[in-house]
Image (cartoon, coloured by chain):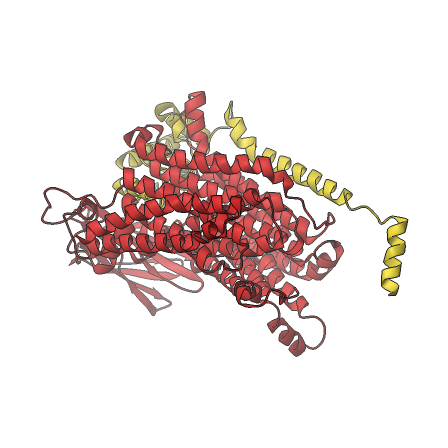
Chain colours: A red, B yellow
Amino acid sequence: MIVELGHFALILAFAVALVQSVVPLVGAHRGWGDWMAAARPMASAQFALIAVSFAALTWAFVTSDFSVALVVDNSHTAKPMIYKISGVWGNHEGSLLLWVLILTLFGACAAWFGGNLPATLQARVLAVQSSIAAAFMAFTIFTSNPFWRTSFPPFDGRDLNPLLQDPGLALHPPFLYLGYVGLSLAFSFAVAALIEGRVDAAWGRWVRPWTLAAWVFLTIGIALGSWWAYYELGWGGFWFWDPVENASLMPWLFATALLHSAIVVEKRESLKAWTILLAILGFGFSLLGTFIVRSGLLTSVHAFATDPERGIWILMIFAFFMGGALMLFAWRGAAMEAKGVFATVSRESALVLNNVLLAVSSFVVFIGTMWPLVAEMFFDRVLTVGPPFFNMAFTPFFVALAVVLPVGAMLPWKRGNLGTPIRRLWGVGVLAIALGALTWTIQTGGSILAPIGVVLGIWVVIGAAADLWLRGGRGSPADRLRRMARLPRADWGKATAHAGLGVTMFAIAAMVGWETEDIRVAHIGQSFEHEGYTLTLTDVQRVQGPNFISTMAFVDVERDGRFIAELRPEKRMYPAAGMPTTEAAIDYGFFRDVYLALGDPQEGGGWALRTYIKPFANWLWAGCILMALGGLISLSDRRFRVAAGERRAPPQAHPAE
Amino acid sequence: MRALFLAIVLGLALPAAPAFAVQPDEILDDPDLERRARSISADLRCVVCRNESIDDSNAELARDMRLMVRERLVAGDTDAQVVNFLVERYGEYILLRPRSDGVNLILWVSAPVMLIAALGIAGVALRRRTATEKPLSPEEEARLRQILRD
């Protein structure tokens, strides 16, 4: 009964979405206030209905209702509760419902917090957002309905894929989707502005917080996925340039570019058409990513045929929204005239350079991801584009970004000269290069990668700190600190996020350049040395878990006779799903991770054991957290809160910013 | 492989399945040869896996390919000869670093070409924008002086 209620709520929401995507548009066109105003309650209703629907599906999972086909395929009574819940979105149908839930949540937020928007703009934004929701609801209902019952309910379920039974992965999809789908609101704003034919500073100010929020979620989502890969896959890799990863990286790059160009719209009323285009492309690439991964197109061209219906649906959704938006852009985009003029050397130009690098790097990823398909379809060459290509083609863009970042961040708006920031930053540059050179001499051979990472990391991090310090003005350090504390939060957010990028770049270079590995047959009771650590395999046992059987090794890690940790790498077998997994054991440290993975028992006795020392591994995710944190700090800036509160203030009380 | 399929279906940003790749018994005694073997196998794709190098993959076939790489190295082949030997057997598909011949040139030059094009477009747009900033006419300047005096 509850499941049917959820099903019904979903269908009802679809009906509401259809009405909402037409009525406010007509209202805005004709100037009928009541038709426009109808959008707001409908957006709330849509969200409420989908929430009911999602709750019903969750209830089916929590109570292990095996009369629902989806629960049978993805759950098991013995599974821990948290994975019963995360099982809701651990499959195609359920994750689509989550996607729709977030889509309607963003729509509802635009209705709730968008009271200060001009009525026509808000009506159009809500209508466009709702048409996206309608498309995805139709997709869910007609091709991927999560509420189908089975005629003969089995006694127990087939269990969730064991790889997904992991805390990191329980949270990964919601964050990723909040990011992907959050970009839909920027898209809706862009299309609404094109219909409206007007983009001004206020538009930039409304779009930026939403984009920023989506970007923060996307950053966290990608970081969670990469962290999961690090500890779960058994050899400590963190990024594989896999099509599914690329599908999340491309929207992230566009969102980052959009974030920066929207600042120019907001502060200087320039780059309007470009920002609109970025907003369209950002969501376009997140749709394209969805299409790529859900259709299975890229695993092999032939996998497409296994489920053509779903692939074609998403392709149609993609073609409709992208084609429509780009046509609208071609028609109206030129009307977005820039007001603020700026010189060739200025903050605006620096942000244009940032946008060029980010957008082109995203297209490089796109071409690399799609090339095997193109080559096979048109040139009859079956080939692979793998990590070596991406590393070579993509990395230079981020090196260039890091090089120009501190200088660009210090340039004044409108007109500047390069001399000032360079004079202020030359000390930082010298320090970075000196420390890089020092690292190069100390590490005795090895790759040049790590020293370059040191140089760039220090340059970006200290550059961000120097920017804040210099903005503190002159006077005693105490005065400066006091003035720095009073700087807008947006400035602190900017510095934090930029520093996060520096930390991440350093960590990637350090980890790739300095990682060491040891592969051997370890015998119980015997010790071996690796990089100054003494490791002793003390025992290997079979351990029964809640829904798995584990082969667990016990390894003592010592350094200079001092006990550091007992690590327990495992191999697990999940009988219900019939799948093995490895669970690496990691001793997390500030400067290094000791990483152990257990292999198979060997014929002559003993166990295969891999030991890695991963320098600065945690810094990689710490950098991502800093980036996300920077976004959050910036999001809490007074400017956005003031804008949000404007609706209650009298109209003449606009803050003079 | 089911894991991969699921990751695809779910649209998660997740790569391949858990692995325990290079086995202790495969490792060559000569550390130089072994280093070369590792770097060659990092650039070769395991044919039955999804986007995994044979160095990372735990598939049987990947193991066969790793052993083949080491066999050829011990026999005295150069790195290029080893790679060609494997490409002859498994096809161009196994190269994670695609060749830069024929149409693949498009792939390899795409990054620099797009960058130059984008910088060019941005440069032209910026120049045109700056050019629209005309200096003040004498009347405007007179008016400005008057405003400033007030």
A109 to the left or right of A329: left
- Camera-side residue of A331 and A578: A331
x and y percentages locating residue B90 in the rendered image: 35, 26
x and y percentages locating residue B51 in the rendered image: 37, 37
Quadrant into which the C terminus of chain A falls: bottom right
Relative height, residue A604 to residue A558 (above, below): above
- Camera-side residue of B147 and A562: B147
x and y percentages locating residue A62 in the rendered image: 20, 57
A33 to the left or right of A483: left
The answer to whether residue B16 of the structure is visible from this angle is no
How many marks overall?
Answer: 0
The answer to whether residue A128 of the structure is visible from this angle is yes
The residue shown at (34%, 54%) is: A231
- Camera-side residue of A152 and A334: A334
The residue shown at (55%, 65%) is: A646
- Camera-side residue of A390 and A563: A390
x and y percentages locating residue A12 in the rendered image: 30, 48
- Examine the image and state in which quarter residue A318 appears: top left
